[in-house]
Image (cartoon, rainbow, N blue to C red):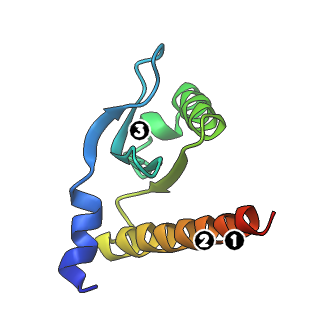
Amino acid sequence: MNKSDLYDLLFDWEHEYRFHNVRRWRFDHANPEHMLAVEYEGGIWTKGRHVRPMGYKNDCDKYNSASLNGWTVLRYTASHTLEQVVNDVVSHHRYALRTQKNLDRIIKSD
């Protein structure tokens, strides 16, 4: 897999994906098939919404709800590079594939 393929893993995702039926919560980027989301936390150096008390609390509610519904949420700031994000996404996919193979082996052995 070359670097271009790695970038496609991220950029072919759905943007502003609404993941909750009741709340209007959205992920910045989401891959619903793999239940994996990428969130960018803006304004951390300028005291933006994500670091103020209610914004932080609301983000906790959002991420906890996502986790309880089976989503993996990877969180980043503007300080993170695209390469870091892509590497984490690829690592998650590799982990998910290994986990699925192990589960398939366990099921077959029963």
- Residue 89 location (% of width, % of height): 42, 66
Quadrant holding the N terminus: bottom left
Label 3 secondary element: loop
Q: Mark 3 against mark 2, which lies toward the viewer?
A: 2
Distance of label 3 from label 2 (alpha carbons): 42 Å
Q: Which residue is mark 1?
A: 105
Residue 90 at what x, y percent from top left? Answer: 42, 72
Is residue 109 found left or right of 37 in the rendered image? right
Position of residue 63 relative to residue 21, above or below, is below
Query: In the rendered image, which residue does mark 2 sit on?
Result: 101
**Quarter assignment of residue 109:** bottom right
Mark earlier in primary sequence (3, 2) = 3
Specify the amino acid type for callout 3.
Answer: Gly
Of all residues, the one furthest to the left in this rendering is 4
Element type at mark 1: helix
Tell me the kind of residue under disc 1: Arg
Residue ID at (48%, 54%): 75
Q: Which quarter shows the C terminus? A: bottom right
Q: Nearer the viewer, mark 2 or mark 1?
A: 1
Q: Quadrant of residue 27?
A: top left
